[in-house]
Image (cartoon, grey):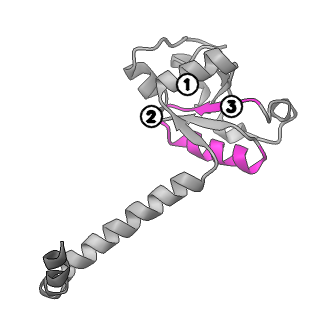
Amino acid sequence: MSEFLHRLPEFMGNHPILSMAFFGVLIAVIANESTRWFRGYKELTPAELTRLINAENALVVDVSAPPDFEKGHITSAKNVAMSQFDPEHKDLGKVKEKPVAVVCRNGQTSARAASRLTKAGFKRVYTLSGGVAAWTAADLPLIKGKK
């Protein structure tokens, strides 16, 4: 290890672009992990979401567009399109202490909705990592049609 540290400045001097690229990637990874740590909600796998629904009767909110929701959604999920998503809605105010899982088709849109819920004071907010696509890939059932 000692020889490595002694030769590191020489390597960095001989390969400045490679060294800058390494530090750029290192900073990006640290920034990504720190934002994930402090964002206020947790990502769940399909198995963890199933346990949360069964054990703690979690509220599942699907923020997919209504046509996507009708193509297939998780049992007991409530559809609220992202364009009409309001964490301050009176019905959501009743469940601020209850676990709330936000899902969408691929896991991207649900992150924005989960962030809005945590800012509105919800204590236990979760997203499904990979969205309904991950749920389907785990061979879990979907309900078709309106709920």
* Quarter location, residue 124: top right
Q: Depth check: 131 or 21 in front?
A: 21
Q: How far apart are marks 3 and 2 (CA)?
A: 17 Å
Of the image marks 3 and 2, the number of the one nearer the N terminus: 3
Name the amino acid type tagged 3: Val
**33 on left or right of 94:** left
Residue marked by disc 2: 130
Q: How crowded is mark 3: few (under 14 residues within 10 Å), some or many (20 or more)?
A: many
Residue 17, percent from left and from top: 20, 80
Bounds of the magenta segment = 98-121
- Residue that carries the numbered disc 3 in the rendered image: 100
Image depth: mark 1 or mark 2 in front: 1
Where's residue 145, x and y in %? 58, 12
Question: Which badge, 1 or 2, is on the more N-terminal residue?
Answer: 1
Where the N terminus falls, by quadrant?
A: bottom left
Q: Which residue is drawn at 60% across and 52% down?
A: 39
Task: Count every numbered label the image shows and give the total.
Answer: 3
| Residue that carries the numbered disc 1 in the rendered image | 49
Circle 1: residue type:
Leu
| Left or right of 26 in this view: 14 | left
Q: In the drawing, does residue 137 fall left or right of residue 122? A: left
In the image, is residue 48 above or below residue 142? below
Q: Which of 122 and 113 is in front in this view?
A: 122
Classify 10 Å Cα crowding around label 1: few (below 14), some (14-19), many (20 and above): many
* Residue 113 against residue 46 in the figure, above or below: below
Q: Residue at x 12, y 86 (%)?
A: 14
- Which image quadrant is residue 82 in? top right
The percent coordinates of residue 90 (x first, y second) are 87, 34
Residue 112 magenta-drawn?
yes
Location of residue 41 in the rendering, given as x and y in whole percent from the top left corner = 62, 44
SS of the residue under disc 1: helix
Sooner in the amino-acid sequence: mark 1 or mark 3: 1
